[in-house]
Amino acid sequence: LARRRRELFAALRARELLGLAAVLVPLSSLLAALGTVVVCFQLWSRKPTLIPGLYLPAISELGVELPQRRIYQVGFGTCGLLLSLGIVIYEELVPPRLRLSSPPLAEGCKVKLLGLQGAAELNGILAICQGLDASSGRWNVRLPDGAVKAVKPENLATQPDPDDEASLRSVFW
């Protein structure tokens, strides 16, 4: 699933469609919400229990009975999925340097490979920093298969240490 996601985003990015998707996906969610309400309103207005003179019922009244309840569930479930997809797309659009600051690169730290173009299939892979090659300015990282690659620092995002995360959770929660 993660590989397919990377492939999809790489294809969108290559065709310069990622920005367009970031606009269209939330708009689609809005249209799904409006469409859901309109369809339920139309069904409600044709009910035999329609109250004369009442033009706009409470929103909660629209999704009470079948088939309106199913339309609400499917419609707003679709909205939630589209909004979630929109968030994932926005995360993909944020350049690594603008993401939340992470600890500095150091030998032995865990990193995620991001924004690689020559080896795009490695994007999203976790690796371990082996050391900085001062002549090239690249970090040597060991991949899960044992291979070592030289990667520019801007293509590496340090991953939080689970112990640090647990201590943060104890402070905030």
Image (cartoon, helix red, strand yellow):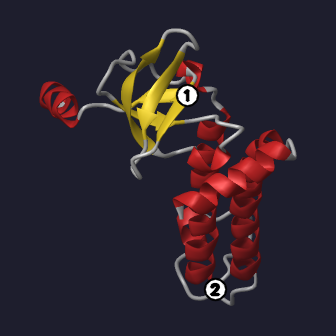
Q: Nearer the viewer, residue 79 or 64?
A: 79
Q: Which residue is pictured at 57% across the width and 35% down the height? A: 114
Count the marks: 2
Q: Which residue is pictured at 43% across the width and 32% down the height? A: 141
Mark 1 is surrounded, within 10 Å at the Cα level, by few (under 14), some (14 to 19) or many (20 or more) other residues, namely many
Question: Percent x, y for residue 91?
Answer: 59, 38
User: Mark 2 belongs to which amino acid?
Assistant: Thr
| Quarter assignment of residue 109 | top left
| Quarter assignment of residue 39 | bottom right
Q: Are marks 1 and 2 in contact (CB under 8 Å)?
A: no
Q: Secondary structure at mark 1?
A: strand
Placement of the N terminus among the 4 image quadrants: bottom right
Q: Would you place residue 128 above or below residue 39 in this image?
A: above
Q: Which residue is pictured at 48% across the width and 22% down the height? A: 139
User: Mark 1 belongs to which amino acid?
Assistant: Val
Q: Say whether residue 138 is left or right of residue 50.
A: left
* Mark identifier at residue 136: none
* Residue at the farthest right position: 15
Q: Nearer the viewer, residue 44 or 37?
A: 37
Q: Would you place residue 3 above or below residue 150 in this image?
A: below
Question: Percent x, y for residue 136?
Answer: 58, 14
* Mark identifier at residue 151: 1
Q: Where is mark 2, residue-wise?
A: 49
Instruction: Work out whether residue 54 can be spotted.
Output: no
Placement of the C terminus among the 4 image quadrants: top left
Q: Which residue is pictured at 70% across the width and 69% down the height? A: 36
Mark 2 is surrounded, within 10 Å at the Cα level, by few (under 14), some (14 to 19) or many (20 or more) other residues, namely few
Callout in the foreground (1, 2): 1
